[in-house]
Image: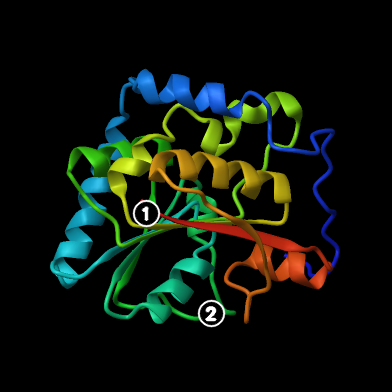
Amino acid sequence: MSAGNSRAVFSAQTEPHRDLGALLERHLHHPFRKPIADYNRAACDQALAAWRAWRPESGLILDAGCGVGWSTVNLARQFPASFVLGVDQSADRLGRERPAVGDLPANAALVRADLVDFWRLLAAEKIRLARHFLLYPNPWPKIGHLARRWHGHAVFPVLRELGGSVECRSNWRIYVAEMALALGRLAGRPVVCEPWVPPQAMTPFERKYLESGHPLWRCRAQL
């Protein structure tokens, strides 16, 4: 990924979507029932087996949408007493080399799975996460794309069942502001959207956005 040439997110939407609250309430009262794919069940079983084989009493961290796995490596080093699962639906991204950050530590694993299923499978297993990261998800910036953003998706309420400390980062303020509102609804307390300047880049996108001069944003909630 080349550095310093990323375009800022453009959208006709300038504030949190007016339909977000109603959409979230609908999803909270009507659980997501889409059938779960067999390959996601197998992926979840393998991921949990890797965690329990390493140190079953350790906390579990989920790096949701980990891409090439930079963030998974960095999180595993930052939290050596926890096990980090990096989950992404792209086998191509997961299979790429990570020379900038090195090998995957022993307290981490990369998993190919669809998060829509993977989240629900973890919840069905009564898994409670220690930490949960959503780092630079696809912003889906068109006004009509609200339901494609994670906080607008029908699966979003399951995050409350997974618990833990949830952190979302983006270079689009609106995305993080909406996520803060949605997480606040799940947590039962206000969540703040704040400017974010990392001490070092956690992901290739974070590095690219920093080198392109983009302001970054994050929100954090305890579920």
Q: Is residue 126 visible?
A: yes
209 relative position to 156: left or right: right
Name the spot of residue 5 as percent of width and height, x first.
86, 63
Q: Nearer the viewer, residue 217 or 80?
A: 217
Which residue extends farthest front? 189
Check the image and report above or below for 72 versus 190: below
Residue 115 is situated, as x and y percent measured from the top left of the image, at 41, 41
Q: Is residue 204 left or right of residue 71?
A: right
Name the residue: 26% across, 44% down.
Answer: 122
**Residue that carries the numbered disc 2 in the rendered image:** 101
**Residue 129 percent across, percent down from the top left:** 29, 56
In this picture, residue 12 sits left or right of residue 203: right
CA gap, disc 2 to disc 1? 18 Å
Answer above or below: position of 159 versus 210: above
Q: Which disc number belongs to residue 74? A: none
Query: The residue under label 2 is which amino acid type?
Result: Val
Q: Quadrant of the N terminus?
A: bottom right
Residue 118 appearing in the image: no
- Which numbered disc flags the more N-terminal residue, 2 or 1? 2
- Tell me what residue is drawn at x 39 percent, y 45 percent: 187
- Total numbered badges shown on the rendered structure: 2
The percent position of residue 125, horizontal first and vertical second, equals 17, 43
Residue at 75 percent of width and 64 percent of height: 209
For badge 1, the amino acid type reads Val
- The residue that disc 1 covers is 111
With 42 as the anchor, is 2 left or right in this view? right
At horizontal 26% and vertical 55% (from top left) the residue drawn is 47
Determine the secondary structure under disc 1: strand
